[in-house]
Amino acid sequence: MSIVEVNNITKKYNLNQISEPVSLRNGLKSIFTKQEKSKDYYALNDVSFSINKGDKLGIIGNNGAGKSTLLKILSRITNPTSGSVQVKGKVASLLEVGTGFHPELSGRENIFLNGAILGMSKREIKAQFDEIVDFAGPQISNFLDTPVKRYSSGMYVRLGFAISAHLNPEILIVDEVLAVGDADFQKKSLGKMKEVAANEKTILFVSHNLTAVANLCNKTLHLEKGTVKQMGETGVVLKNYMSEVQSKKMSYSAESFQQGIGNELIRLKYAEIKPELSKDLDYWTVNDPFNLHFEFWNTLEDVDLNVSIHLYASTGECIFNIGNQPSKYDAGIISTDIAIPGHFLNDGSYFLSIMVVKNSSIVLANFEELFEFEIADYRENTTWYGKWPGYVRPNFPIIMKQVTSEI
Amino acid sequence: MAFYIKLFSEIFQERELLYILAKRDVSIRYKQTYLGIIWAIIRPVLTMLVFLFAFKNVAKISDISGFPIQLVIFSGVIFWNLFANTFQAVSNSILANNNLVSKVYFPRLIIAFSSIAVSLFDFIIGLIVYIILSLYLVHTLPITLLLLPLAVVLTLLFSIGLGLLFCSYSVKYRDFLQMIPLIVQYGFFVSPIVYTAKSLQISNWFNVYSLINPLVGIVEYARILLIPSYSVLNFDFIYLSIGTCFITFFLGIYVFTKKESSFVDYL
């Protein structure tokens, strides 16, 4: 039995109205003058799907894919331009934490205010008040009667999430609220989500955190430019999504010397970055080793050459710079292979640059940001799905054993 | 009719939210002020004193149509403030609460209705001051005071209705926001706030005017209830004003509910 049914919904925004200010003058003008064809933007275009009671649906997609618009329509905040939505049951939507918190009011007053806004009755809030305060942590319980404008942003978010976590709807719509707070609090909130997911509740969950989607959701909807790209079992959809995302910029080749990038001395002929994927997965995870292979044309005879590889995180920090010992080469094609082990880089996006160096000091060619690639997270036997910190994620053995059985 | 019944039952279901939003507005109203609710007394009293000075010392008038100047002006001012504050609060309610409108769904009328709490609160404070003033000046209070809630309800119907109309259009066209201060500023003088309707009642356009500006009827009706032996020439214009109050209220609600689903696209 489907509990949420979305039939051909389309949400159209008029770009003219977005660029030109909406005012009475423009409003009147548009009545009296024949408008040139208005530029429409479709945030959602003919989207249909349905989910059953108890389903946990993950919604993924790039920025601008229409995820937020979809959530807004499902939670009745805005209406679709066309199409219909049928939702059976009480809905609570968490598009942000602490909606409607008033800075001048105390933590206590805001619990009642926010709870009421999210659709809880006064009795429900009273019954769960102590649990909410307890969940928010000791910092909050000490400052319960302080105006929330005096709270730190962390406290504000913790209190907001604690209230939301105690909602009891049949259908819960969640937008990225898990990406709040410190690692410790994230752990707690994801644990709570998991607890909610365990019972018969229906959840719609938008997230960029694919690990969380993989672990919380049985079904996944992949939106792309306002249309449904794929909808189905989470494992299948995530696999296709990741392999699509990862095929960004991972190989390069030139037909002839003249076409190759570089300069008159050095030109790049071929380059490829290739992960050794695990058998059961179609995408590159933190477990997988990868090889960098490239070939270049060298025009110099009897020259001391070496290469230098820079790897950068998407934020711009250099993760490593490696080079080899220089040795003698003649003009022609020179190939290079580098093997980088698995269990080394953490998940994230990376850029890679290649440099060809003469006499270990003169840079002959620098192929900056030649490759851009993304490594996905992989976890087993864990209940924590927050972003794993750090740029590297080595698998060093940790030996832990019981020394005695007495205290 | 079925439309309004369904709407009001939906709002009744959300009465806890309505109550807590109203409570929020009232409790933050005078936060971080030293004088607190005394401000609710200062404003109408100051308005009255200014006109008292103008009438007594400048124009050398000692009464208005035979009634104490203070009572006539103060009764007019508290009702005018009730109208003006409610009208402004309702007009601004959606824009002022855009963080709620764009993040959570509940009937938007809840926001508009809850915003009248502050003006009602100020009105009650003003009324208490009026009662004290009346006991001091004429040593009596008419029994008809008990009917005053009727006049309050009529004022609210009109100001909510008008506010909802402005609110519905101002979300998209902010031009309407610019008109609100003008209405509040000039409306004060074209309504019988610092004068009575008696002097105008002989004019043949007076009934039409009461129909257009229902504050004429409401304020005079309130004075009949508040000021001992207050009189008007006839009651026709009051009925006309009452009619306008109801029409404005239901029209405002109708327009608002037609527009509410698109609010979030213009916030």
Image (cartoon, grey):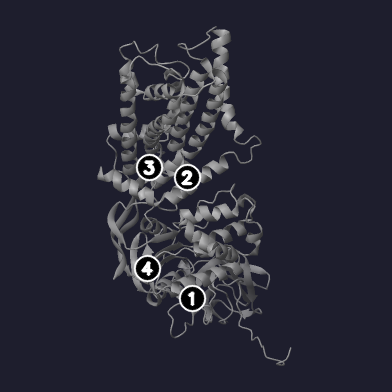
Marks counted in the figure total 4
Picture residue at 63% right of the left edge, 76% below the top: A306
The mark closer to the camera, 2 or 1, is: 2
Chain identifier of the residue bearing label 2 in the image? B
**Which residue in the protein does label 1 denote?**
A272
Residue A151: % across, % down: 63, 54
**Which residue in the protein does label 3 denote?**
A17
Q: Secondary structure at mark 3?
A: helix
Does the CB distance between marks 1 and 4 fall below 8 Å?
no
Give the mark nearer the N terminus: 1 vs 4. 4
Residue A213: % across, % down: 45, 71
**Which residue in the protein does label 4 denote?**
A221
Q: Secondary structure at mark 4?
A: strand
Give the mark nearer the N terminus: 1 vs 3. 3
Q: Amino acid at mark 3?
A: Gln
- How far apart marks 2 and 4 lie (CA) works out to 32 Å
Query: In this image, B254 relative to A376: left or right?
Result: left
- Crowding around mark 1 (Cα neighbors within 10 Å: few <14, some 14 to 19, many 20+) is some
Q: Are marks 1 and 3 on the same chain?
A: yes
The mark closer to the camera, 2 or 4, is: 2
The answer to whether one can see residue A267 in this image is no
- How far apart marks 2 and 1 lie (CA) works out to 54 Å
- Crowding around mark 3 (Cα neighbors within 10 Å: few <14, some 14 to 19, many 20+) is some
Quarter holding the N terminus of chain A?
bottom left
Give the mark nearer the N terminus: 4 vs 3. 3
The image's mark for residue B97 is: 2
On screen, A401 above or below B214? below
- Crowding around mark 4 (Cα neighbors within 10 Å: few <14, some 14 to 19, many 20+) is many
Q: Secondary structure at mark 2?
A: loop
Does the CB distance between marks 3 and 2 fall below 8 Å?
no
Query: In this image, B203 relative to B134: left or right?
Result: left
